[in-house]
Amino acid sequence: WEEEPPTTNMEEADPPSTSPSPFFIVYAYDVSGDNVRFFHASDPEAFHVRTAARPQSFEPGRLYCLKWSSDDHPIFSHLSEQTAAVYLERQRFALTGERYEGTVLRALLLSARIKDFENRSALVTSVSESSISLSMPNIPIGRRARFITEWGAPVDVGVEQVIRSHRGMHVICSARSPTRGLFKNSYVELDSANIKIPISTRALDDFFHRRRTVADRSFLNRIYGDVGSYVNRKPDDRPYHLRDRDRRSLVMSPAQSAAIRQYQATSPDCPGFVLEGPTHTGKTLSITAMAVSIATSRREDTPGVTLSERASGGMQLIVSNTQRSLRELASGLEALEVGNLRILNVSDYGSAFSVSDIPGAENNPILTRLWDLKEQLGYATKREAEQILPQLQRAHRAAVRLAGPQDIVLITLEDVMYCMMQDPFRSCPVQKMLQSASRIIIDNVHCVSEVELNALALLHSRPGVKIVGVGDRSKIPPRRNDITGKLAGVSALELMTMKRNLPVIKLRQAFTDEDQGNWQDPEPEVHLKHFFKGCQSGSNRLFVAVKASRAMPSGDSYINDAELAAVEYVVGRLRQRGVHHDQVLVVALHRAQLELAKSRLPTSYEVISLQKAEALRGSRFLFQNVVIIMTTSNDLHGGSDELNARGSALASSLDASTIVFGDSDLRSTEPWAALLHEHRYDVLPY
């Protein structure tokens, strides 16, 4: 538990003392009289103590200094402003070497402990002798669970129904044991046997307790060192050429070309860089081109490549926060000329380059078992699916072990940390494959937390490993402004660019064909400047005619990927223009499109159904400056005509600036044609 004493100015401070400090930095979670429940970085569970002394203003939700008296009684006191600043605003200080373990690692692990505890806590919204209703964050939960009340009494429940939303989940349970000690608006906690500690927390815990050691600190010293303490050379931005699978030549933009050459550089003094840009500027193409350029150069059958260039290649690891992003990257790799490169998508068994594409897969019993389970899952009931999924996951892991060495590996952030956290003394081919990575590309780095970036960097802290972050600054999710939010830190994209110690390459243009000789402008034909100017006055109307709009059936509803891509673009542009997320409301006419939008738009944006929008019409919920309406279906008959009539009626009643997304045929089809003409909607082809 002994803390390293932080200093007031870490840029000018001497190295921290090796002698232990007599105080500990803790987070007071709950205070009831003299009883205190607090967290420390050393343990995942909260500590309960009775204080011997405390400050007069002793409140929960704050950091305190904890000392132990000579007779082992806890004494709480306020932290100094300097010490609190080093913990909560560590990005402003130089915290390298031992200071990293003494401050950064402790603060991140403490924030992870608090977040994990909050994720397994639930609010009791109603309780009776046979039924309990709980409100809690979105976490996996089985059909049976045990909760611990505030008084420490266990309550066994059977989970009858789970209603999930982007704000959390509502759980309806049947009581399987007495509900004494449960009251409305009280809190309960999932029993430790029912929870799974996040893999990023486990990774930080291993390094905190020195079960693992940091082999190389080059990347960590860049992001936590002095501001501007490293000189970054300007990368070569001469046009870079590559070919697609049809052997057509593609010419990268100057920024993309610079990113590829920066990625290829073998200089040990640059352990990473950042590639950022808004939607439709070619980030996916840049990622795939970078990986292919290195993987191709290391193949023995590539002419004109020296032995040193081949040796510097290594396996390329592409990491993302979601399987959906990996599928898009796999499709991007499939569109390029990859020759006989060995490419594997570890985290998905249904996309391009999955384990199903392994040579000789048709005669392998493990893969045959995998395909059988996938087929069973397709028509299984909910209860049968719960039994099939664990078998499917085990079969998939067994199939991945058959793949052998790879040139490019695609994997989710959680999966790569899970594999790296396996016992190094056990024979794990996947872990050995991941350990051989020479370069790591993190897609959607704006969605990666500071805790996750540190866990990934620590697990891959080998000399020579280069980490590249690719993301969109306009999509950084908002963070909490309390002590917990400050402890958790900033997004990985902000952290990698904050100290200006890593090169930052900004994408503003997309690639073009070699014959055209000019760069394509990623923006739509009509700019949005006039619309943005009128957003505050609420006087603008805009119809976005989505080219290639195609509604696809999803159960008894519809989804439309092209329409949602257009919504993502406009939402990003609104944010760049200063229209905050709480000023935007998104309305979906179709239920399936509503769920898809919630999963793809930043969680801070509110997406509601048409029925809810009609119920809230005229209330404070529709006083947002901008209301976005997704029509989704290009089939205006066969059940969609009623929804379109209700959607157009809602649009005509709004006082806010309104953006309607839909197929271009809506301009000539009632009821939308009359609405667009009467309210003088501007038309934006997308």
Image: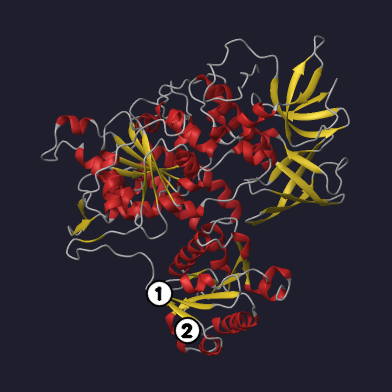
Residue 266 visible here: yes
Image quadrant assignment for residue 250: bottom left
Is 184 above or below relative to 440? below
Q: Amino acid at mark 2?
A: Leu
Q: Amino acid at mark 1?
A: Val
Q: Secondary structure at mark 1?
A: loop
| Nearest-to-viewer mark from 2 and 1 | 1
Image quadrant assignment for residue 78: top right
Q: How many marks?
A: 2
The residue under label 1 is 526
Dividing the image into 4 quarters, which one contains the C terminus?
bottom left
Which sits in the foreground, 530 or 340? 530
User: What is the image's colouring?
Assistant: secondary structure
Which sits in the foreground, 163 or 63? 63
Is 91 above or below relative to 279? above
Q: Disc number at residue 666?
A: 2
Residue 456 appears left or right of 358? right
Q: Position of residue 457 (x, y in %)?
A: 45, 32
Dividing the image into 4 quarters, which one contains the N terminus?
top right
Q: Position of residue 5 (x, y in %)?
A: 63, 19
Residue 420 visible here: no
Q: Residue furthest left?
A: 304
Q: Position of residue 2 (x, y in %)?
A: 65, 16
Which sits in the foreground, 81 or 208? 81
Q: Secondary structure at mark 2?
A: helix
Image quadrant assignment for residue 582: bottom right
Dot 1 crowding, Cα within 10 Å, few <14, some 14–19, many 20+: few
Q: Disc number at residue 104?
A: none
Q: What is the CA distance from the residue labelled 2 to the residue labelled 1?
A: 18 Å
Residue 32 appears left or right of 364? right
Is 191 above or below relative to 595? above
Residue under the image location 15 percent in, 30 percent down: 307
